[in-house]
Amino acid sequence: MTIQQILRDAGSYLKERNIEDPSREAGLLLSWYLKKDLGYLYGHMDMELDENAISGFMSLIERRGRHEPYGYITGQCEFMSLTFEVNPAVLIPRADTEILAEAALFALGKFTLSASEAQIPVLPKKETYRGLDMGTGSGCLAISIAKYMPSIIMDAVDISEEALNTARRNAIRHKVINRVNFFRYDILSDSFISRYTEGNKYDIIVSNPPYIPDGDIPTLMPSVKDYEPYNALAGGEDGLIFYRAIAKLSEKLLADDGILAVECGFDQAENIRDIFAREKLKSVFLKDFSGINRVIVAIKQV
Ligand SMILES: C[S@@+](CC[C@H](N)C(=O)[O-])C[C@H]1O[C@@H](n2cnc3c(N)ncnc32)[C@H](O)[C@@H]1O
């Protein structure tokens, strides 16, 4: 069977199973499987594949046809131009979350983007900043912030030990393990986080917490609800339980001129602004590419 034939069969197989952009997915999976770039595949459409290669590739296509996310099949995902290991213990980092990473970097004096239009505050210049990532998952936020901001030391917490182990491997891979400390912590617990963080106050706190209302989870796409960790999705009855906890923690943990930046669901920004306001945090919103308020950046009101 040639590359052209197998791509055609794989594309039709994925199309029948309602996978979006089936031909592209088939091409990307074959490219990953053969360790050749897409340009090589398109330039060698007549190349014959042996039986082993065909059956190995088709078993990946069958997994994708069952809606297993592409990232879990390949075990990796791109975020902020960095490659992260992902597995079923961690949420696959989303493009929207890059808006949060960029907002944090903007506040730290890096990058320019539409953040300036939203009047995101910039932190006063310092030799060393301290940051906290709550619900770190793969570590994508803490690690990319540390990677692009060499003068920050990050703490990153998660309730899942397996997620923390994945995040540690990602920090080693990106050579920031000496500046990102990972520890298990339950954001919803009453235990005071300073026990772990040695009483440090943070210049910046970021979080992309679970924010789907529990009752909506069965309505999500199969690739999300059947494969991604429930713990990474479920945000309590109204989806806002973590924002209340993070606002309360920030009151204790955020430096007086510090910044709290969170991602939220498509209809949650205004409710979160109200939750934050009750803890004397003043919010601005950042929109995603669909024009939805997706990131909230807050500062302490003085
Ligand atoms: C939406 S995921 C975000 C992961 C990553 N920061 C990202 O943006 O891709 C939320 C993370 O919060 C973690 N989490 C869930 N409940 C938690 C809790 N009570 N305390 C701490 N972390 C929790 C989950 O394990 C998951 O890794």
Image: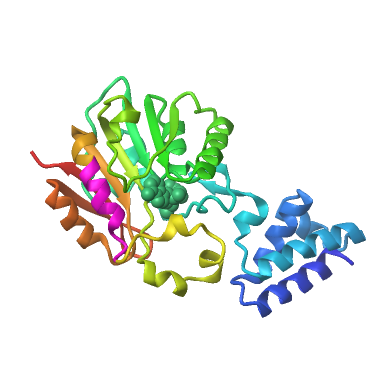
Decide if residue 39 is in sight here.
no
Q: x and y percent of residue 260 in the render? A: 26, 42
Residue at 72 percent of width and 52 percent of height: 32
260 or 237: which is nearer to us?
Answer: 237
Q: Is residue 102 left or right of residue 225?
A: left
209 or 33: which is nearer to us?
Answer: 209
Decide if residue 51 is in sight here.
yes
Residue at 22 percent of width and 47 percent of height: 247
Q: Is residue 292 left or right of residue 275?
A: right
93 or 185: which is nearer to us?
Answer: 185
Residue at 72 percent of width and 51 percent of height: 37
| Residue extent of the magenta highlight | 238-249
Q: x and y percent of residue 191 in the render? A: 29, 39
Q: x and y percent of residue 235 in the render? A: 35, 60
* Residue 196 falls within the magenta-colored stretch: no
Figure check: 288 above or below 151: below
* Residue 187 image-quadrant placement: top left
Q: Is residue 106 left or right of residue 146?
A: left
Residue at 87 percent of width and 65 percent of height: 2
> Which color mode does the image show?
rainbow
* Residue 128 image-quadrant placement: top left
Figure check: 181 above or below 278: above
Image quarter (top left, top right, bottom left or bottom right) of the N terminus: bottom right
Q: Is residue 108 left or right of residue 119?
A: right
The residue at the far top in this view is 127
Q: x and y percent of residue 170 in the render? A: 55, 37
Q: Main secondary structure of the magenta part?
A: helix
